[in-house]
Image: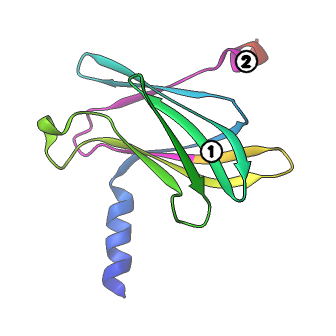
Amino acid sequence: MMLVLLTGIVYANDYREIRKFSLKKDEQKKILVKYDLKERLFKFRWTLFVNDGLVMHRSYDKIVSQNILYLNGRNQSVHQELMTRGAHGYEVPYLLLKFKKFDMKKHEALFELFLYDKQSEIKLEILKNKDEMNAKS
């Protein structure tokens, strides 16, 4: 039992950044992923919450995917590799986007974003939506 707990603690410490996002339906979050001299865009949004499933759309470097995420632990997160495997073997940097909660009153989904980057090569820049910039003006 103790071995399982220690493994979980070590595994959790491997993540370099943890961020939280709360998004309304069709609100998009954009994150610029920078490494070497490259910049790639990771985007995600959700379109439907029904039967405890959240339909989520995401794209990374113009490759589009759709997932259904659930709160019960099964299919609760998506994994996005940020670089090709050839350069890093099994230590490929990745993002883990986890669906944490759905607020029925506000119609918002809460996500946590984790960055696994053992060699500290990745920089993330959270891009502001036009609506967010206008609200702060």
Q: Is residue 57 magenta?
A: no
Q: In the image as oriented, which residue stretches furthest toward the right?
A: 105
Q: Is residue 72 left or right of residue 85?
A: right
Q: Is residue 91 left or right of residue 10?
A: left
Q: Quadrant of the C terminus?
A: top right
Residue in the picture at 69% in, 46% down: 109
Give the vertical position of 11 relative to 117 (above or below). below
Check disc 2: other Cα within 10 Å, few if <14, some if 14-19, many if 20+. few
In the rendering, which numbered label is found on residue 55? 1
**Badge 2 element:** helix
Residue in the picture at 72% in, 48% down: 49
Chain part drawn in magenta: 112-133
Q: Nearer the viewer, residue 75 or 40?
A: 75
Mark 1 vs mark 2: in front: 1
Q: Which residue is mark 2?
A: 131
**Badge 1 element:** strand
Marks 1 and 2, how far apart at CA: 23 Å
Picture coordinates of residue 62, whole percent (x, y): 41, 22
Q: In the image as oriented, which residue stretches furthest toward the bottom?
A: 1
Picture coordinates of residue 66, whole percent (x, y): 52, 39
Looking at numbered disc 1 in the image, what kind of residue is underneath it?
Answer: Val
Residue in the picture at 71% in, 43% down: 48
Image label count: 2
Picture coordinates of residue 108, whole percent (x, y): 75, 43
Q: Nearer the viewer, residue 88 or 134?
A: 88
